[in-house]
Amino acid sequence: MPVLVMKFGGTSVATLDKIKRAAKRVGREVANGYDVIVVVSAMSGETNKLVGYVNDTSPMYDAREYDAIVSSGENVTAGLMALTLQEMDVPARSWQGWQVPLKTTSAHGAARIEEIPTDNITAKFDEGMKVAVVAGFQGISPEGRITTLGRGGSDTTAVAFAAAFGAERCDIYTDVDGVYTTDPRIENKARKMEKIAFEEMLELASLGAKVLQTRSVELAMRYGVKLRVLSSFEEYDPNAGTLICAEEEIVENQPVSGIAASREEAKMTLVAVADRPGIAAAIFGPLAEAGINVDMIVQNISDNGETDMTFSCPTDQVARAKAALDAAKESGGINFSELLCDPDVAKISLVGIGMRSQSGVAAKMFEVLSKEGINLKVIATSEIKISVLVDRKYTELAVQALHDAFNLDQV
């Protein structure tokens, strides 16, 4: 039988009534002739509650016990979903990560999937089981301990199962009905896209779009897994949602497909750094070791053997970045006269695979923002992306102006 993977996020299984609603969707796909692997998150709010218990009990907690505790939310949902399906006369069984077994690295709290053997679940399908309800977000380490994949890890679990089982498609059910040209809360003319290329979705996810976890899109692109994002709260429609697929499946590529906005950005500048070979490595090596997620990097023209180095990072990593750079200065690895931080910036990004073949996108973007009186603090580009840092107060204005300028409300 063909295999279909269906993933339900926390809001889709937040109550028993919502679990029943999700189970009906699963039952419909079984009736359509599929063996179904259902991947579930914890009920909405449950993981945060469990994390709170851990922090209240042991602020300097053992990561192995953290994983044992926070993974339990998915186990509850998986059992409830399996019971609900059984009440509907659909042969179903719940599976925890260790039972599959979903094999991961030993990095507790941020484990990576290494292997998903298919034998155990396939054998049960052969015996008549129609639905395997898998607890997302969790696996088992080589030492036999429960591991978790990081927040949003259930998306990654679902895509990994789709790749391992050669699934026809992986449907991600959430509280939105697809992928939009930008955040509808910022621009009410945002349009739901029928299709988007893997590369575009990967950029949008990494730039602040919260529809899918970045790692799940990376996996889907690597293994050619067709992803569909759709709402669990709308009536059944076989053509609903947004399909995330290979570029070749999209008939015509627009120069810009979407706009991402990330408010949680900070701009940091090292003033008067020695302009010498290896200085970039001396700066960004300590930042990498401290786990700082550096994004946009700009180096000024050298003057009298000195230069300024500017980069962006998430606002919640500013303190660690400062500590790492100060430590590098004290050890003599780098020298700078001042470390400036602007925590009130936003990153606005245009994304589109059509940029590869169409020129003038950057010029148009800069002109539009200039007419709105928005100053650009940092600019960074790639083959299918243009990002700028602007004052955070201009986030909505920038997104709305660019959305209109590139006619993203039109098909």
Image: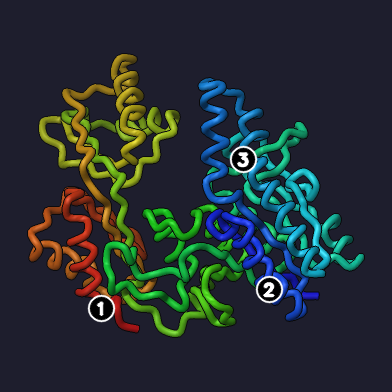
Q: CA distance from mark 2 to mark 3?
A: 26 Å
Q: Earlier in the sequence, mark 2 or mark 3?
A: 3
Q: Secondary structure at mark 3?
A: loop
Disc 1 packing (10 Å; few <14; some 14–19; many ≥20):
few
Residue 14's spot in the image, x, y percent?
Answer: 57, 54
Which residue is at 50% across, 74% downward?
A: 241
Say which amino acid is labelled 3. Ala
Which residue is at 39% across, 28% downward?
A: 286
Disc marking residue 168 = 2
Residue 363's spot in the image, x, y percent?
Answer: 17, 67
Q: Secondary structure at mark 1?
A: loop
Judge from the rendering whether residue 157 lies leftward or rightward of residue 325; answer left or right. right
The answer to whether residue 278 of the structure is visible from this angle is no
Q: CA distance from mark 3 to mark 1?
A: 41 Å
Which residue is at 15% across, 37% downward?
A: 302
Which residue is at 29% across, 60% downward?
A: 386
Disc 2 packing (10 Å; few <14; some 14–19; many ≥20):
some
Are the residues tagged 2 and 1 within 8 Å (C-beta)? no
Quarter of the picture containing the N terminus is bottom right
**Residue nearer the viewer, 92 or 361:** 92
Q: Earlier in the sequence, mark 2 or mark 1?
A: 2
Disc marking residue 111 = 3
The residue that label 1 is drawn on is: 407
Residue 73 figure quarter: top right
Residue 172's spot in the image, x, y percent?
Answer: 57, 64
Say which amino acid is labelled 2. Glu
Say which amino acid is labelled 1. Asn
Q: Secondary structure at mark 2?
A: loop
Question: Colour mode?
Answer: rainbow
